[in-house]
Amino acid sequence: MYHTDAINTDSWLMENPYVNEINEENPYGYTIEMNAAKAKEKGLANGGKVRLSSLEGASVEGVLATSEGVHAECVSVIGGHWGSKSKYMPRAFNKGVPVVHLIPGQTPDRLDHICSAFDQCVRVKIEKIA
């Protein structure tokens, strides 16, 4: 899942120098968050590099931040569509974890039939990167 904190508004503010500085100093700013007890159970450590892989074969990598604020069956990332590759966004370039890359193809069966938004609940596997 992804969420927005008090500083970020999805990824629209990543290019703002002040917001970027806060995110770089924030231990949860550009990370993948996971429940601390569940991370320990899986042999994952706070600050370690991890990979999220979807059932469809897509994957993203990031730094793990453990927290008691995340449900044990979830992982979470601030923003949802970070990891910009645009040369016109030099501050935001390649920062954060672009979890939208894990959402499978845009097929009608993944649409919310009330507001036409895509279902962003994606099952993933998390693993340590050596």
Image (cartoon, grey):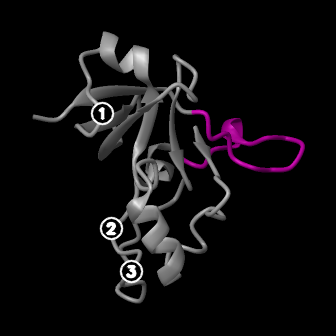
Mark closer to the observer (2, 1) = 1
Residue on which the image places disc 2? 94
Which contiguous range is marked in magenta? 105-121
In the picture, measured across the screen, residue 4 lies left or right of residue 93, that is right
Q: For residue 59, say whether it is visible.
A: yes
Seen from this angle, which residue lies furthest right?
Answer: 114
Which quadrant of the rendered structure holds the N terminus?
top right
Q: Are marks 1 and 3 in contact (CB under 8 Å)?
A: no
Residue at the spot x=46%, y=73% of the render? 20
Seen from this angle, which residue lies furthest bottom?
Answer: 88
Amino acid carrying mark 2 in the image: Asn
Of the image marks 2 and 1, the number of the one nearer the N terminus: 1
Query: 110 or 60: nearer the eye?
Result: 60
Q: Position of residue 111 (x, y in %)?
A: 73, 42
Residue at the spot x=39%, y=48% of the render? 31
Seen from this angle, which residue lies furthest top?
Answer: 41
Q: Position of residue 68 (x, y in %)?
A: 52, 25
Which quadrant of the rendered structure holds the C terminus?
top left
Amino acid carrying mark 1 in the image: Asn
Residue at the spot x=60%, y=73% of the render? 12
Query: 83 or 72: nearer the eye?
Result: 72
Examine the rendered structure and indicate whether residue 101 appears above or below residue 121.
below
Q: Position of residue 97 (x, y in %)?
A: 40, 53
Judged from the image, the secondary structure of the residue bearing numbered disc 1 is: loop
CA–CA distance in space, label 1 to label 3: 25 Å
Q: Tell me if mark 3 has few (under 14), some (14-19) or many (20+) residues whose alpha carbon lies within 10 angstroms of its own.
A: some
Q: For residue 104, say whether it is visible.
A: no
Residue on which the image places disc 3? 91
Specify the principal SS of the magenta part. Answer: loop
Q: Which mark is residue 46?
A: 1
